[in-house]
Image (cartoon, grey):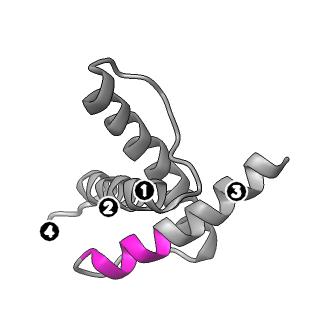
Amino acid sequence: MLDIIAWVVLGLLAGAIAKAIYPGHQGGGIFATILLGIVGAFIGGSLYSLLATGSLQLAAAGLTIPGLVTAIIGAMIAIFLWGLMTRRTV
């Protein structure tokens, strides 16, 4: 149960910081921000695992300063990918 609360807190922090850093307007409320941050924690943790060990593993960043930075980078990647998928051309 404590891990889930830590992921929600990490997701909220990482998603909010990533939305503030990333240029442009991103929609969504508090739940979208938390979900974006949690997805970012998994993306960032998995990329860190790939760079550190050379093998791709599904891993989440922890509730530490390096984990928060990793989750923010992952959340920014998630924002970018979401923007590519939902972009409308007129």
Q: Is residue 1 magenta?
A: no
Work out whether mark 2 precedes mark 3 in sequence or the reverse, and give the earlier one.
Answer: 3
Three-letter amino acid code of the residue under disc 3: Ala
Q: Left of 23 or right of it: where is 61?
A: right
Work out whether mark 4 precedes mark 3 in sequence or the reverse, and give the earlier one.
Answer: 3
Distance from disc 4 to disc 3, alpha carbons, whole Å, reads 41 Å
Q: Quick one: label 2, few (<14), some, or many (20+) residues within 10 Å?
A: many
State the SS at label 2: helix
Distance from disc 3 to disc 1, alpha carbons, whole Å, reads 15 Å
The numbered disc on residue 90 is 4
Three-letter amino acid code of the residue under disc 2: Met
The numbered disc on residue 76 is 2
Q: Which residue is labeled 3 in the image?
A: 6
With respect to residue 21, does 81 lie above or below?
Answer: above
Three-letter amino acid code of the residue under disc 1: Pro
Q: Which residue is labeled 1 in the image?
A: 66
Residue situated in front as seen by the camera: 42 or 35: 42
Work out whether mark 3 precedes mark 1 in sequence or the reverse, and give the earlier one.
Answer: 3
Distance from disc 2 to disc 3, alpha carbons, whole Å, reads 20 Å
Q: Marks 1 and 4: CB-CB under 8 Å? A: no
Distance from disc 1 to disc 2, alpha carbons, whole Å, reads 15 Å
Q: Position of residue 88 (x, y in %)?
A: 23, 63
Work out whether mark 1 precedes mark 2 in sequence or the reverse, and give the earlier one.
Answer: 1
Magenta region: 15-22
Distance from disc 4 to disc 2, alpha carbons, whole Å, reads 25 Å
Work out whether mark 1 precedes mark 4 in sequence or the reverse, and give the earlier one.
Answer: 1
Q: Position of residue 1 (x, y in %)?
A: 85, 47
With respect to residue 55, does 50 lie above or below?
Answer: below
The numbered disc on residue 41 is none
Q: Left of 41 or right of it: where is 26?
A: left
State the SS at label 3: helix
Q: Residue at x 59, y 61 (%)?
A: 10
